[in-house]
């Protein structure tokens, strides 16, 4: 396994790999790897000759009052996990390498960002789309693997790839959870012991909503209210949103039908956690 910090060097490596007829699977991350990332790496490993993992905490996707500075980082631990997962190359650039001072273009996402995390985190998805545009050009993968824990991100990135004709395929991967149901996240380390205990209720609230829908409740307001109530009764977290939309369009629904997403974001003292379930009604 090699660690590459230069975009030019990465590009020349992947050009050679592509010329030799090998396929490249790509897993973009912000590091501090956990089993969620590992699942994406395993998927990539089982479908490609070469697996590239990128580790880059992208300042463009963090708002001014968010956790860019204190986002957890541990490259040595990540290297070990990546090696065990059979990664061939880690692309690990500095902020200066990705965003030299003279940059003059950013990507702006114009659809699906007025809801959920796009609404709570203005500019977040522009930052995601900008960094991925760069990473896709640097890594030139045949397929890129993304977790459905960030389902809005998957929808936005599919739009980016389609609208800008990137010659690659996006592969969505199911959310990996702790034994008690909490979605694995690099930010879980910021939960206090009490909050970690409560945090399992986030997934329970989603399951409650799902069950209501499966038992015939088609009124989104009623489902959202039940989910909200469960979170309020079982956690000390502050609800950022509990919402239901069509998926992947992310349009408001008067009545639940088709493929929908029930998504939540809850702020604990030092961590804002998100989770969702996608349901075929
Ligand atoms: P991050 O490092 O948080 O930016 O995540 C990198 C990739 O891993 C994204 O595609 C995430 O959706 C995915 N991911 C994060 N947590 C999970 C999880 N619990 N299960 C599956 N994929 C995940």
Image (cartoon, grey):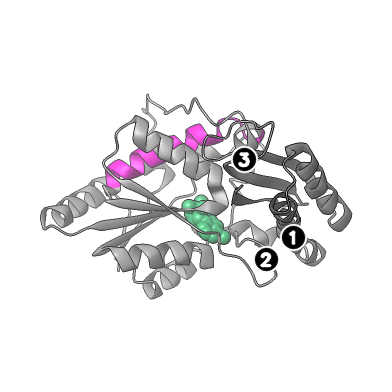
Residue 170: percent from left, percent from top: 38, 48
Q: Give whichever of discs 1 and 2 has the lower sequence position.
A: 2
Which image quadrant: the N terminus? Answer: bottom left
Residue at image mark 1? 204
- Name the residue that disc number 3 marks: 257
Residue 250: in magenta span: no
Q: Identify which residue, 163 or 215, lies in the foreground.
A: 215
Q: Which region is colored magenta?
A: 120-138
- Give the residue displayed 59% in from the left and 31% down from the top: 251
Q: Determine the CA span between mark 1 and mark 3.
A: 22 Å
Outermost residue, left direction?
A: 20
Q: Count neighbours of disc 1 (C-alpha within 10 A) and say few if under 14, some if 14 to 19, many if 20 or more.
A: some
Disc 2 or 3, which lies upstream in sequence? 2
Mark number for residue 181?
2
- Residue furthest to the right in view is 233
Q: Are marks 1 and 2 in contact (CB under 8 Å)?
A: yes
The answer to whether mark 1 and mark 3 are in CB contact below 8 A is no
- Can residue 247 be spotted in the picture? yes
Left/right of residue 139 with respect to residue 214 in the rendered view:
left
Q: Residues within 10 Å of mark 2 (few under 14, many from 20)?
A: some
What's the distance in space between the residues labelled 1 and 2, CA to CA? Answer: 8 Å
Q: Mostly what secondary structure, the magenta segment? A: helix
């Amino acid at each position: 396994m090699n660690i590459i910090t230069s975009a030019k060097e990465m590009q020349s490596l992947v050009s050679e790999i592509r010329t030799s007829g090998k396929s490249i699977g790509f897993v973009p991350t912000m590091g501090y790897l956990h089993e969620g990332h590992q699942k994406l790496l395993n998927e990539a490993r089982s479908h490609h000759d070469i697996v590239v993992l990128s580790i880059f905490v992208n300042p463009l996707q963090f708002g001014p009052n968010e956790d860019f500075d204190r986002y957890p980082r541990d490259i040595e631990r990540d290297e070990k996990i990546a090696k065990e997962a059979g990664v061939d190359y880690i692309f690990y650039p500095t902020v200066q390498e990705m965003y030299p001072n003279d940059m003059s273009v950013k990507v702006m996402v114009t659809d699906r960002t007025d809801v959920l995390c796009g609404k709570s985190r203005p500019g977040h998805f522009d930052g995601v789309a900008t960094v991925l545009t760069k990473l896709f050009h640097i890594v030139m993968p045949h397929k890129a693997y993304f977790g459905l824990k960030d389902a809005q991100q998957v929808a936005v990135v599919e739009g980016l790839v389609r609208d800008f004709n990137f010659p690659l395929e996006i592969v969505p991967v199911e959310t990996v959870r702790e034994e008690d149901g909490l979605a694995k996240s690099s930010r879980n380390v910021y939960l206090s012991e009490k909050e970690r205990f409560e945090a399992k209720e986030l997934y329970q609230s989603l399951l409650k909503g799902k069950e209501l829908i499966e038992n015939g409740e088609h009124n989104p307001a009623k489902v959202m209210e039940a989910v909200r109530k469960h979170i309020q009764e079982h956690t000390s977290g502050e609800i950022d949103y509990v919402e239901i939309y069509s998926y992947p369009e992310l349009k408001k629904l008067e009545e639940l039908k088709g493929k929908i997403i029930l998504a939540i974001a809850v702020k604990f003292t030092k961590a804002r956690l998100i989770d969702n379930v996608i349901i075929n009604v």
